[in-house]
């Protein structure tokens, strides 16, 4: 969320998304920590919850979210499912030290029905 405000120069998420998408055909994806994530495309809002974990180290969680989201999206799984995959990947990455020791793989996603 902090990144969204910094990039847009706006003070609230809705204004920030309107600012970024004005006269553009963009998909805006916003990581929202333990509150999951949301996205907007063509004025349609999508959201996903994350899984609850007890984080050890949050290094790389955003990168893991991004990788998970892109994996889903580029494989045609849709925005909501891609958000969910991103949330799971981001959360699982916090369970180890350094950001890569507990990165999610396909087998981890199947545990969550994906």
Image (tube, rainbow, N blue to C red):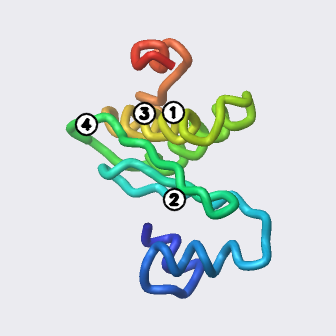
Mark 4: give few (<14), some (14-19) or many (20+) Cα within 10 Å. few
Mark 3: give few (<14), some (14-19) or many (20+) Cα within 10 Å. many
Where is mark 3, residue-wise?
88
- Please tell me the numbered disc located at residue 85: 1
Earlier residue among tags 1 and 2: 2
Q: Are marks 1 and 2 in contact (CB under 8 Å)?
A: no
Where is mark 2, residue-wise?
30
Q: Are marks 3 and 1 in contact (CB under 8 Å)?
A: yes
In the displayed structure image, the side of residue 107 where residue 58 appears, left or right = left
Q: Is residue 84 above or below residue 108?
A: below
Residue shown at the point (20%, 38%) measured from the top left: 54
Quarter where residue 20 is shown? bottom right
Q: Are marks 2 and 4 in contact (CB under 8 Å)?
A: no
- Please tell me the numbered disc located at residue 58: none
Residue shown at the point (47%, 34%) measured from the top left: 89
The quarter in which the N terminus is drawn is bottom left
């Amino acid at each position: 969320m902090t990144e969204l405000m910094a990039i847009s120069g706006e003070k609230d998420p809705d204004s920030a998304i309107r600012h970024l998408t004005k006269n553009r055909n963009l998909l805006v994806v916003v990581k929202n920590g333990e509150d999951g994530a949301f996205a907007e495309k063509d004025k349609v809002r999508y959201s996903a919850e994350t899984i609850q974990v007890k984080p050890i180290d949050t290094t790389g969680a955003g990168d893991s979210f991004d990788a998970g989201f892109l994996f889903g999206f580029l494989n045609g799984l849709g925005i909501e499912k891609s958000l969910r995959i991103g949330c799971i990947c981001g959360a699982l990455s916090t369970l180890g030290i350094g950001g890569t020791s507990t990165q999610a793989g396909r087998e981890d996603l199947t545990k969550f029905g994906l």
